[in-house]
Image (tube, rainbow, N blue to C red):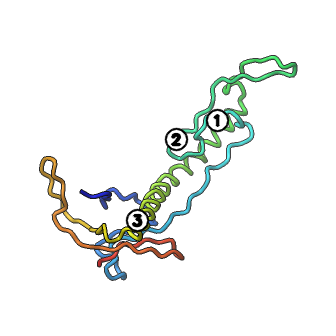
Amino acid sequence: EQPWALRLADLPKHERIQAAQPIEGDDGVRLKLVRPEIHPCPSPPEALNDWLKDGWDDPDREATPIEIRTEFDGHGEPYESRFAGLFERLQAYDDWIRRRQLWASAERPARKVLRLYERFFALHSQIEREGESYDLLLGDGLFDQGDLHHPVLLRRVELSFKPGEREFRVVDS
């Protein structure tokens, strides 16, 4: 039983990940993973203040407006205000949502790489603490019979970290 497994086919497509057999120019390097840059969501225009549901700055979620909300007039009397009730607000939303969609499509893969980078960081820390208890193996091919799923060929590898470059490498042992 493996505490953690990663299929190379499941790696996100991103410039900060290189995987090959081996990577050209780097003897025995099987995988390089560099921490990606994460960019914040473009700020919504002022016309959308308090009109967006939580999560508008998450690239994996939709930026959804609040359709109706209660506001108060100058006398403190409540009234219903509709998101679609102001053309300028709709136009500001349309302009902003186009910029946000461009950001989200570029940001999603970077966030996947960041999650993988954080998993590698935790794995590296665990190996540093309990190295005698674990072997890091690279498998090729898969025997798949009923409940048994096991790589056909195994190769012992090491996980190294270059803090200055914020880079993990999986290298032949």
Cα distance in 3D space between marks 2 and 3: 32 Å
Q: Which residue is mark 1?
A: 52
Earlier-in-chain disc, 1 versus 3: 1
Left or right of 3? Residue 67 is: right
Q: Quadrant of residue 119?
A: bottom left
Q: Secondary structure at mark 3?
A: helix
Left or right of 108? Residue 4 is: left
Which amino acid, by three-letter code, is at mark 1? Answer: Leu
> In the displayed structure, would residue 124 be above or below residue 87?
below
Q: Secondary structure at mark 1?
A: loop
Earlier-in-chain disc, 1 versus 2: 1
Q: From the viewer's perspective, is the residue at label 2 or at label 3 nearer? A: 3
Which amino acid, by three-letter code, is at mark 2? Answer: Arg
Q: Which residue is mark 3?
A: 126
Q: Quadrant of residue 7?
A: bottom left
**Where is residue 102 drawn, in percent x and y?**
55, 50
